[in-house]
Each structure stands twice: as C-alpha cells, then as structure tokens.
Amino acid sequence: MLNNLFVDSYWDVGRSYELTQGIDCPETATFFNTLQQRSTKEPSLMKNAVCVFELNAGIPLRRHFDSDFAGGFNFYGGMADHVLVLRHINTVYNYDYVYDYIFHQNGVIEVRVGLTGYIITSQDTTRYGYPLYAGEIGNVHQHSFNYKVDLDILGTQNRFETVDIVLENITNPERPDLRHIQTRIQRNLRRTEREAAVQYDFNEPKYYNFYNEEETNRFGVNRGYRVQLNGIAKTLLPRQDWAPMRGVAWQDYQLAVTRRKESEPSSSSIYNQNDLYEPLVDFQTFIDDDENIVDEDLVAWVTLSTHHIPHSEDFPTTATAGTQMQFFLRPFNYYDEDPSVGSSNAILITPGEKSGSVRVERFGTPTGPACVSEQSPFRYNGTWRGPH
C-alpha cells in the first residue's frame, strides 16, 4: 500500500460552507456571509459561513478561596471565563475542520482547530490500521496545520527570544556539605532565522517570547507576547531522505520565526500539490537565507499536528472530542497586571456581620432576571455555487 500525501491548500481549504444554527454555532450566534472565489469562474456567495458568539467556557478565568483554617473563610473571589469566539468550518472532501479564534478577557488569544468528518479507508492489511467496516481498514495518518502569525508588539521592530528553563547545581547555604539542584531561567535572544527554527525537545523546556526592546512595563520588564504550543507532534517522514516532503517543509518545525516579506505571503501554495518534489513554495528557503531578526518586523509560523490511528469509534464520522489542537498568544509582561481585573463580571464574597451571613460584591453588575435571546426560526439552505 502507498499512503497519499494531501496538501489541503490545493483542496479548497479556504472555502467555508454554510453553518447550522444550534449545532455548528450556538443559537445566539451572529452569522456572516463570505464572498469566495475558489475553483469557480466567478465569486460565490457563501451564506452564513462565519459565526461570532459569546460563550461561558464553563471554567473560572481566575478564582481563589481564602480559608481562615478555623472552619470558615476570609474571602472568595472569582470570575467566569466569558469569551468571544469567531468560527468557520472547512469541508475538504471527506474531512471537516472546525477553526476557532477565541478571545479571553485577560488578553489571551486562543487558536484552535478540531477534526471531524469521514476517514478515508482502504482494503489492505492491518499493518496500516484497524479493521472497520466491510473488510476495510482506517489508515494511520497525520494532520498538520500551519498558521502565519504576524505579531506587532507595540510597533513592528520586535525581537524573539526563548526563555529557557535550565538546571543549576549549587551549594546548600544552610548545609555547605550538601548540594542543591534547582531550576532557573535563562534568556536567549535569537538573532537569525536559523536560530529561531524550533524543533521541540522535551529535555529543553522554554517559553517563546516576542517583545519590544524599547517598551517596558512598570517593573522595567520588556513588554511582550509569547506563543504557547499545546498541539504539537513530530512528523516521522524524513525530508532529507524523501523528496516529496519539500512541499510541506514547514511540518518539520513546531515554530519558526522569519522576517516579514511580501514575497513570503504563505508557507505553501495551491500549486504545491502538483509537484511536491519541486514545489512552487519551499518553506525551507524562508529559513535558509538566515536573515537577521533583531529589531525587525517578525512573523511566527506555528504548526499544529496530531497522529491519527482510526478506530471503530471513528465510524461513521470522527468526533471533535479529543481531536482538538490549539496554541495560545499570551501576554508576557505586556500589562502591569491581569487586565481582567477591570471587568465588572467578577465577584467578591466576604463574611457578613451575622454568623453565617455573607456580603456579595458584584462591582455594579446587576442580578435578578436575565435577558434571554429570542430563538430564531431554524433555516438552512446549503447551496453555494454561483455568482453573488
């Protein structure tokens, strides 16, 4: 058996079809049409292809219960994680990809993709997967997504550093005859594009920080945003030994940082699928010119990836639960404090004057009956081809 290598930028990955109210997006979502021109002579109007909605994430954004260690408490403070979500869903032949951009009230931006849809099966041996239905197997495969993240931290002149977590072996000051091993941080400025190409090593944990050398917070620390990778997987296909991997060279790196160029608009091309051996866009060239990236306009190329061994529960369709990958853009000394403290959605509870009573501070947020959005009639058309 020969496995296929699909470059989905060729297979209309940019097309989002109509979303279903109450399933693809909550009943309260606002829907937008998009105008797209892929594989058609004229632009097509895609109805309700993008939705925006607010969501209670079901977890506190922050909270603390302060015990008095005598059967009571000093205070409880907390705030629900109400987020704003922008969503669209691509159907690429057999698979559906749910793309979310999630904005949290503490300045964190979460970028997430979930997998669903049909798997491609084959009539082959179980060396490549588990039996599923009618004598077919689900072939082992890997999903990878590359995002271009154009970060401008208080201007376009930025730097990229790793904040490495390293070990140190020191003398115990209280017991000079003993050694003490502990961790510390070590800032490491990356000066060129090759230095900033990341192939993650669990033995060398680190933060990936973009910052402005000329801007500091009230503590004198450079203001920045860091990229946190929560959905990474190494590709086993060797680019140096198998030429087709040139067409997806970005898959080798969980993160790469390059200078922003108009001549490097994307890490791939709709034409790469046509010739992976000599691709129109070879991402490795973005790194190999090894340009200076200190105090430059920088771009982060983030790769999310997962290995998928289909199993019986993937039939008839793969479920999104457990197949979601994400990365975060997190403020890193950008603010003087958590900006969500300015929200009136928080709550502070303290003991009252009488035994068993409490004082509840809602910071001006009213209580009582809540407005519930009127449910709109269910509508779905599903058509998309044709001029706008």
Image (cartoon, helix red, strand yellow):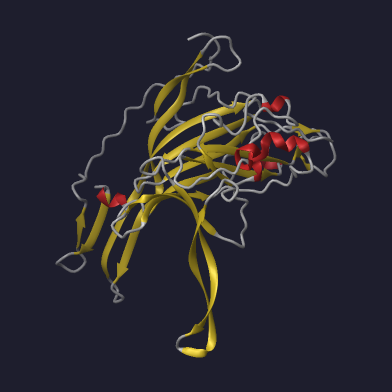
> Is the N terminus in the top left, top right, bottom left or bottom right quadrant?
top right
Query: In the figure, is residue 249 to the left or right of 22?
Result: right
Residue occupying the point 63% across, 51% down: 199
Query: In the figure, is residue 196 to the left or right of 336?
Result: right
Please tell me which residue lies in front, 231 or 67. 231
What x and y, as percent, mark residue 378?
A: 43, 22
What x and y, as percent, mark residue 91?
A: 59, 27
Q: How many numbered tags mark residues here?
A: 0
Residue 176 visible in the shown view:
yes
Answer with the quarter of the image where residue 350 lies: bottom left
Residue occupying the point 49% across, 64% down: 186
Vertical side of 256 occupied by 205: above or below: below
Please tell me which residue lies in front, 181 or 188. 188
Residue occupying the point 46% across, 42% down: 296
What x and y, as percent, mark residue 3?
A: 78, 35
Please tell me which residue lies in front, 288 or 94. 288
Query: In the figure, is residue 135 to the left or right of 388?
Result: right
Residue 59 visible in the shown view:
no
Residue occupying the point 49% across, 69% down: 184
Vertical side of 184 occupied by 197: above or below: above
